[in-house]
């Protein structure tokens, strides 16, 4: 795995990158970088149309984390409702699912913001350590785009 952190705009990466970000299972998408994902990809409407019963299914999932690939976007689901906070456990579960999807779909390059560390208030050092540990056995490139 190649892991890099750079100060740059996430949406300026080349099209061969899949983009990853965190959302809630209710697909609320009202604050933070998800607003930009919604503007650029109409993600909220796409997910609600494709997965109308997703929240109920998520509640039934004991793992507490998930990932949905839509277009070229990996939507990491790390909490049930938008107003809740994820845990490192739900983040790890979502990242594990993301890894499965990337391997299945031959996605080799992923760009993401400092997932979970903004409005969700997870410790970035913990999250990045989890990413590095989970993806160390892959040939993937993980690019973390940080705000200036």
Image (cartoon, rainbow, N blue to C red):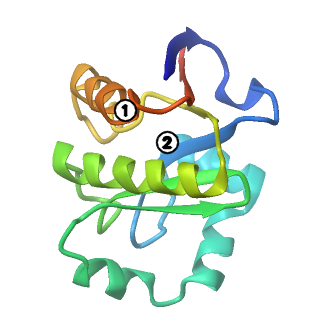
Which quadrant of the view contains residue 93?
bottom left
Q: Above or below — where is 79 with respect to 32?
A: below
Q: Where is residue 25 in the image (x, y as percent from the top left)?
A: 39, 69
Left or right: 131 with respect to 7? Answer: left
Q: Where is residue 45 in the image (x, y as percent from the top left)?
A: 67, 74
Image quarter hosting the C terminus = top right
Q: What element carries label 1?
A: loop
State the residue at coordinates (46%, 90%).
53
- Which mark sits nearer the N-terminus, 2 or 1? 2
From the viewer's perspective, is 13 left or right of 57?
A: right
Q: Are marks 2 and 1 in contact (CB under 8 Å)?
A: yes
Pointer 1 residue: 118
Q: In this view, does 31 lie above or below 132?
A: below
Q: Where is residue 21 in the image (x, y as percent from the top left)?
A: 51, 45
**Which corner quadrant of the image does residue 26 belong to?**
bottom left
Q: Name the residue under label 2.
A: 32
Q: What residue is at 72 percent from the left and 62 percent from the top?
A: 42
Q: Is mark 2 on a helix, strand or loop?
A: loop
Few, some or many residues within 10 Å of mark 2 (<14, 14–19, 20+): few
Residue 47 marker = none
Please give the name of the residue rendered at 37% of the width and 32% of the height, measured from the top-left corner.
Answer: 118
Residue 117 image point, x, y percent: 33, 31
Q: Establish if 17 lies above or below 90.
A: above
């Amino acid at each position: 795995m190649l892991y890099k952190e750079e100060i740059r705009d996430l949406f300026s990466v080349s099209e061969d990158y899949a983009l990853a970000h965190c959302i809630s299972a209710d697909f609320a998408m009202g604050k933070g970088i998800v607003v930009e994902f919604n503007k650029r990809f109409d993600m909220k409407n796409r997910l609600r149309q494709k997965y109308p019963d997703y929240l109920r299914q998520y509640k039934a999932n004991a793992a507490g984390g998930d990932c949905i690939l839509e277009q070229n976007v990996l939507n990491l689901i790390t909490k049930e409702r938008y107003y809740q906070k994820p845990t490192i456990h739900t983040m790890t579960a979502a990242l594990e699912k993301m890894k499965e999807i990337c391997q299945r779909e031959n996605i080799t390059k992923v760009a993401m913001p400092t997932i979970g560390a903004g409005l969700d208030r997870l410790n970035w050092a913990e999250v990045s350590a989890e990413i590095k540990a989970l993806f160390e056995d892959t040939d993937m490139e993980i690019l973390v785009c940080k705000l200036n």
